[in-house]
Amino acid sequence: MENRGNVHFTVKTVLFIGKNALGEVIFTKEVPGWYLLAGASRAYGADVPPERCGEVAGVDMEVKADRHSLRGNLVADPSMCGQR
């Protein structure tokens, strides 16, 4: 997450929602947020359960902040399993 603005804000939570090729939810993980100063960035992540990794076709992310909510997604590939 990157704050390109000139005021800080607080990320309350980041929710990761893993889906299979049919769009079915196969895992969720919510992580707590933290403040983000102006001009700063912070990485948020969640481990995919190893037994589900090969099934993941995509991960949706929902960021809830004190003033805004943001959404994004990542297209996943089984070759990503085990990479860090």
Image: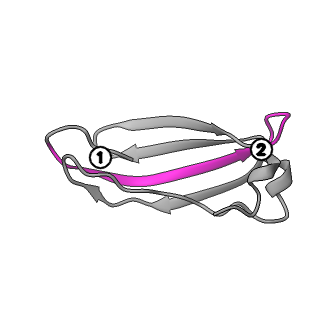
Q: Amino acid at mark 2?
A: Asp
Q: Which mark is residue 66?
A: 1
Q: What separation in Å lies between label 1 and label 2 (alpha carbons)? A: 33 Å
Q: Nearer the viewer, mark 1 or mark 2?
A: 2
Element type where label 2 sits in the image: loop
Nearer the observer, 71 or 75 = 75
| Residue 2: quadrant of the picture | top left
Residue drawn at the location 43% of the way across and 36% of the way down: 70
Residue drawn at the location 39% of the way across and 59% of the way down: 33
Would you say residue 23 sits in the magenta stretch? yes
**Magenta residue span:** 7-24
Residue 50 placement (x, y as % from top left): 79, 65
* Mark 1 residue crowding within 10 angstroms, few (<14) / some (14–19) / many (20+): few
Residue drawn at the location 29% of the way across and 46% of the way down: 66
Residue drawn at the location 41% of the way across and 45% of the way down: 64
Q: Earlier in the sequence, mark 1 or mark 2?
A: 1
Position of 51 with respect to 41 (left or right) is right
Residue 59 placement (x, y as % from top left): 66, 43
Q: Which SS type dominates the magenta stretch?
A: strand
Q: Which mark is residue 77?
A: 2
**Above or below: residue 32 compared with residue 24:** below
**Above or below: residue 9 compared with residue 21:** below
Element type where label 1 sits in the image: loop
Position of 76 with respect to 67 (left or right) is right
